[in-house]
Image (cartoon, rainbow, N blue to C red):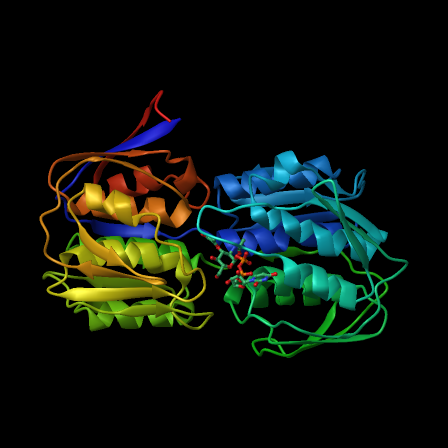
Amino acid sequence: MDKFVIHGGRRLQGSVTISGAKNASLALMPTSLLAPGKYELSNTPRNRDVTTFSHLLESLGVQAELNGNTLVLDSSNITSHEAPYEQVKQMRASIYVLGPLVARFGEAKVSLPGGCNFGPRPIDLHLKGLEKLGANITLEGGYIHAHCKRLQGAHFHFDVSSVGASVNIMMAATLAAGHTTLTNVALEPEVTALALMLIKMGARIEGLGTTTLEIDGVDELKPVNDSTIPDRIEAATYLIAAAATRGSVTAHNVDAHHLTAVLQALEDSGCELDVTENSIHVNMDANPKPVDITTAPYPGYPTDAQAQWSAYMLNATGTARIKDTIYPTRFGYVPELHRLGATIDTDDSSCFVKGGARLTGATVMSSDLRASASLVIAAMMAEGESEILRVYHIDRGYASIETRLTELGASIRREQTAEY
Ligand code: EPU
């Protein structure tokens, strides 16, 4: 187990290059199951979730190699249609192999993902969507078994806007016989990035960037090369960290269009922003005004950046309400922030951060990926030394965060610990 040791009180300054988006990579990688052959995915982030998903693909017979930031996948020889519990329990996005496997091979067996550290995360829409396309689905021994002769186009409406279900069902529909209409499709940029890659592969999809996709199934697709879009959540994390330390940081390799809600919140809090084609500069030299946020599906404020906002608001000149409508119980980090001296109340789906409390270093525990990012930011704001335990959570989605924060002037080092 690794931990971070952080000495707070330093201002972040300089430049950081943002990685490719973890959640886009995880959506692009399973396309390799839809057509045999070789794929090169550039701008792939070097984080633990990408490694975990590569191992899952390898267990199905795909050869995977990450050279620098180019992920080379060769799916010429698929040997298995089963995603075992050992793989799926490490990462819920493993469910993304279900749609492609059943669409191409007519069968798939995928372990049910099980619980999650920040509340229930059902997969009913993934299963209902595939059933609507004609898959026969049964649950047995903790596994989803899906069978079909060939998927058939149909109309499927997502009751809830879901990134994962949109990804899975879109991939499946590309190989279904006939026409599929998907309504209330998630608008997140990672979903559009997948649609663009599928179109390159020969899929016939219309309606990109809207909530209705019209898909004409094709008999086969072909392998292609693609590039991963910038990680809007990683960018949000560094920009918020800069503001929280009253810093001055430029994030490069970003798409500001994907960050409208976060940039608006930063501006409302008093930050100066300078946005160009592919960079965002943030400068903050005062305590922020309190800014309430409510998470919502894209283009709303992302749930994956709410914990970081709570940390930032610890310096605010009043109380800010952070409400999560996507995952109403995603506040596991609050008791850990209390250990640093924070004053935060919670109710059913919100926390109320009272700015201005004196923050002092302490030992705190990460509970999930974005919670860990929040703790790192808060520790950089606190006086003295903090230890952040279980940083394997942060390694899932942030490549070498301690190196990049050190380059920006933070005092943060990784150490091994026997503590759990
Ligand atoms: N939902 C259902 N039924 C389903 C699927 C989802 O009711 O079958 C609900 C969820 O309970 C939630 C809402 O729909 O309330 C949205 O969930 P979604 O399916 O969009 O989440 P996801 O696909 O499981 C992805 C990201 C998450 C991110 C959410 C929301 C990936 C691999 N994961 O998860 O990212 O929080 O969308 O934007 O893309 C992270 O990166 O830290 C992370 C957790």
Q: Is residue 326 something one can see in this rendering?
A: yes
Left or right relative to 371: residue 26: right
- 103 horizontally vs 378: left or right: right
Give the vertical position of 137 relative to 324 (above or below).
above
Q: Position of residue 280 (x, y in %)?
A: 30, 64
User: Measuring 79% from the left and 39% from the top, which residue is drawn there?
Assistant: 80
Residue furthest top as drawn: 418
For the residue pair 387 and 48, the one nearer the viewer reads as 387
The residue positioned farthest toward the right in the image shown:
149
The image quarter in which residue 382 lies: top left
Q: Find residue 277 and report its image quarter.
A: bottom left
Q: Where is residue 123, by image quadrant? A: bottom right
Q: Is residue 249 visible?
A: no
Q: Residue 18: x percent and y percent? A: 39, 53
Residue 70 position, x and y percent, is 56, 45
Q: Quadrant of the C terminus?
A: top left
Q: Which percent across, then down, holds residue 278?
A: 38, 64
Q: How many marks?
A: 0
For the residue pair 12 and 346, the one nearer the viewer reads as: 346
Name above or below for residue 397 compared with residue 154.
above
Above or below, comparing residue 237 to residue 219 in the picture: above
- Residue placed most toward the observer, 364 or 43: 364
Residue at x 21% of width, y 55% of height: 344
> Where is the N terminus found, in terms of image quarters?
top left
